Image: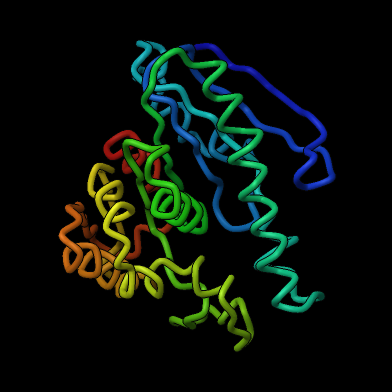
Amino acid sequence: MNREYHKWFSPALQRDMELLIFGHSGRAVLFFPTRTARFFDYENWGIIGAMREQISNGEVQLFCVDSIDAESFYNGHIHPHDRISRHLQYEQYLLTEVIPMMKSKNEGNYLETAGCSMGAYHAINLALKYPSLFRKAVGISGRYDLTENPGDFKDLMDGFRDESVYFNMPVQYLANLNDKSLLAEIRKVEIVLAIGETDPFLYSNKDLSQLLWNKDIPNQLYIWTSNAHRPHYWRRMVPMYV
């Protein structure tokens, strides 16, 4: 199985960023890590190993990017306005640096986003904002409005709201989305959501799925038994849905 490590200084983030590539061809998947996790965690947790057959057969090529959640949404030392601003810099890093690199490494025209937990938020949010770039988006154990506080999880914006926050919370902006061309592009994306029946984010997934259907956007929602919010479950879920 092909494995490549890459590191470069990101102009968008003004710091070094690292990523791992697994595979040599197939569907190119932008794979986001979990909350404040690292680009190597999926490998360490055996999730890459669980996809070894698909990767080795050239069915899929995973681009495991790093997280800067600790500098954005989970940085309680800065104002929420600066948190969302840092997130938008991360988005530019993905759009102007990572995705062009993916296209240079993969000769196909099939791009996909995927992630678990916080990574699911990143995957779904990016695909809904820029649907013309992607053919598929997979969110596993995700939370799609970071301003809500389900269970023990806090509002990551601490009550702060502005336009940038609104347009990065899928459950918020999708409800009022009426741009016909954007909706048409989103309808072309295969959207898959998977969540545990006792996961605190269950209702966020149900809300997002229903909002999508309300806009005539097909999507698949799979509800697993128990919480299903651990690597043990993701080792089964990722090969199934990604």
Looking at the image, residue 126 lies above or below residue 71: above
Looking at the image, residue 157 lies above or below residue 121: below
Residue at x-position 23% and y-position 63%: 212
Query: Which residue is nearer to you in this view: 43 or 84?
Result: 84
Location of residue 165 (image quadrant): bottom right
Q: Is residue 93 left or right of residue 128?
A: right
The percent position of residue 153, horizontal first and vertical second, equals: 52, 78
Residue at x-position 71% and y-position 24%: 6
Q: Is residue 225 left or right of residue 89?
A: left
The percent position of residue 7, horizontal first and vertical second, equals: 76, 28
Looking at the image, residue 211 lies above or below residue 87: below
Q: Is residue 31 left or right of residue 226?
A: right
- Is any atom of residue 198 visible in this view? no
Query: Which residue is nearer to you in this view: 137 or 41?
Result: 137
Query: Which residue is nearer to you in this view: 168 or 51?
Result: 168
Query: Which residue is nearer to you in this view: 226 or 125?
Result: 125
Residue at x-position 17% and y-position 63%: 213
Looking at the image, residue 20 lies above or below residue 235: above
Indicate the quadrant containing the C terminus: top left, top right, bottom left or bottom right: top left
- Is any atom of residue 57 visible in this view? yes
Q: How is the image coloured?
A: rainbow
Location of residue 158 (image quadrant): bottom right
Residue at x-position 34% and y-position 64%: 227
The percent position of residue 98, horizontal first and vertical second, equals: 61, 33
Figure label count: 0
Q: Is residue 65 left or right of residue 81?
A: left
The percent position of residue 31, horizontal first and vertical second, equals: 50, 39
Residue at the far bottom: name it. Answer: 159
